[in-house]
Image (cartoon, grey):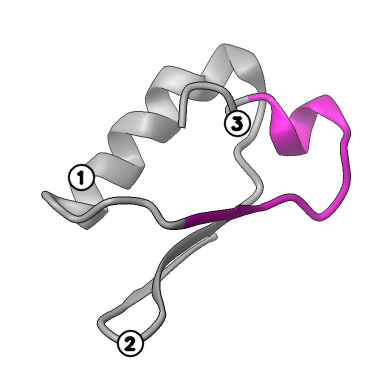
């Protein structure tokens, strides 16, 4: 889930599987445009929640 506003910036909760990292990156980039991703929050450290952390 991606939250973005002018006050608190852009935060992504969980980054999905590493095998989906490029797709997740593309979706985040599409939504944010030139803005940067400020924060990643992982709800827990299973691969389906933190696999894309390194790329993002």
Rendered image: mark on residue 30: 1
Rendered image: mark on residue 4: none
> Is 30 above or below relative to 38?
above
Residue at mark 3: 53
> Is 40 above or below relative to 1?
above
Residue found at x 33% / y 87%: 7
Residue found at x 74% / y 50%: 42
Front in this rendered view, residue 4 or 36: 36
Residue at mark 2: 7
Q: Which residues are magenta?
A: 39-51
* Element class at badge 3: loop
- Residue 10 vs residue 44: left or right? left
Distance Cα–Cα, label 3 vs label 1: 17 Å
Distance Cα–Cα, label 2 vs label 3: 23 Å
Q: Give the class, few, some or many, for how many residues have Cα within 10 Å of label 3's Cα (few <14, many ≥20).
A: some
Distance Cα–Cα, label 2 vs label 1: 20 Å
Q: Are marks 2 and 3 in contact (CB under 8 Å)?
A: no
């Amino acid at each position: 889930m991606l939250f973005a506003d002018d006050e608190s910036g852009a935060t992504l909760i969980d980054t999905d599987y590493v095998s989906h990292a490029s797709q997740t990156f593309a979706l985040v980039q599409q939504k944010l445009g030139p803005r940067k991703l400020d924060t990643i929050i992982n709800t827990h450290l299973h691969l389906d929640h933190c696999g894309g952390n390194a790329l993002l």
